Image (tube, helix red, strand yellow):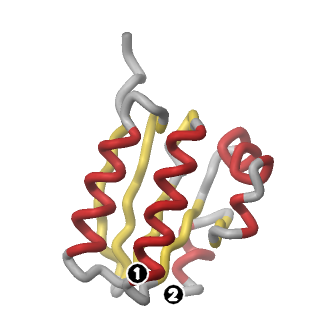
């Protein structure tokens, strides 16, 4: 069955590492994003932006991954932000109140201005 796997691609924009997360982020594949985020945070990355422009589904497991990444980055003194969520993904983030604990921006350009 297609669409079960999350895709994570990395790109550097100046001092910010951007992770492009696409397709679905749920309990079947959240560990992939955890693995990637852990590697980049532990390598000393200080500015991490998660781009959800191509993400079509975000489950509670995916939300936990985001919160864990944000907390881990905070303990390292870095910045963790989310940008470009599609309408439904943004709604999920807002419904659970994560827009109050995570920095969420409508566009990548807007988020990059806050690093």
Q: Is residue 80 left or right of residue 11?
A: right
Measured as percent of width and height from the top left, residue 13 is found at: 36, 77
Residue at 34% x, 52% y is: 34
Which residue occupies the foreground of this view, 31 or 91?
A: 31
Q: Which residue is mark 2?
A: 115
Residue at 62% x, 76% y is: 110
Location of residue 83 (image quadrant): bottom right
Q: Which residue is mark 1?
A: 47
Question: Tag 2's secondary structure?
Answer: loop
Measured as percent of width and height from the top left, residue 56 is found at: 56, 35
Residue at 29% x, 63% y is: 38
Which residue occupies the foreground of this view, 61 or 10?
A: 61
Give how far apart the Cα atoms at labels 2 and 1 are: 7 Å
Above or below: residue 71 compared with residue 38: below
Q: Is residue 87 left or right of residue 29?
A: right
Which residue occupies the foreground of this view, 113 or 24?
A: 24
Identify the mark nearer the N-term, 2 or 1. 1
Above or below: residue 28 compared with residue 98: above
Question: Tag 1's secondary structure?
Answer: strand
């Amino acid at each position: 069955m297609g669409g079960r796997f999350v895709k994570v691609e990395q790109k550097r924009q100046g001092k910010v590492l951007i992770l492009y997360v696409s397709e679905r982020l749920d309990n079947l594949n959240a560990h992939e994003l955890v693995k990637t985020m852990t590697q980049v945070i532990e390598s000393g990355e200080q500015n991490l932006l998660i781009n959800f422009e191509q993400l079509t589904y975000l489950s509670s497991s995916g939300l936990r991954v985001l919160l864990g990444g944000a907390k881990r980055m905070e303990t390292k003194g870095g910045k963790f932000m989310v940008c470009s969520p599609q309408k439904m993904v943004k709604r999920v983030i807002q419904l659970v109140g994560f827009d109050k604990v995570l920095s969420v921006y409508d566009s990548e350009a807007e988020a990059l201005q806050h690093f």
